[in-house]
Amino acid sequence: MATREERLSAAAARAYKSLETRIGDDHLPSPGLWWCRGCGQDVEWPCAAARASLVKAYSGDRPGLLFYLDLLYARALVDLPPQPKGQLRARIVGWAR
Ligand SMILES: [Zn+2]
């Protein structure tokens, strides 16, 4: 039986993998680093274009968008070094609230 953490990690990995089918390949996060591959290393993901694409992909389904962003956040939390409490969540999820 998978633990809750293992299930969350698998769901987060699936969410990350499915980004391209949701928003195309122009503004994806750089693997493991989470800057925008389309905008460059100076721009943290999600950039403005990625946010617009995510909103479009989930048009009319804000709960679905927030759930999806939470999974991406779980993935980013593993990928990135520790940051001040709440900062990463605000960046990945907070903009859509
Ligand atoms: Zn971008």
Image (spheres, rainbow, N blue to C red):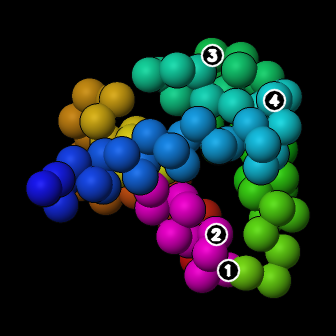
- 74 in magenta: no
**Foreground residue, 92 or 11?**
11
Residue at position x 56%, y 71% in the image: 66
Q: Amino acid at mark 1?
A: Arg
Mark 2 to mark 1 CA distance (whole Å):
5 Å
Q: Which residue matches tag 1?
A: 62
Where residue 75 appears, as percent x and y from the top left, is: 39, 42
| Circle nearer the viewer, 2 or 3 | 2
**In this rendering, would 11 be left or right of 91?**
left
Given the current orientation, which residue lies at the most extreme front position?
1
- 64 in magenta: yes
Q: Secondary structure at mark 1?
A: helix
Q: Give the extent of the magenta segment.
A: 62-71
Q: Which residue matches tag 4?
A: 25
Q: Which residue matches tag 2?
A: 65
Label of residue 41 in the image: 3
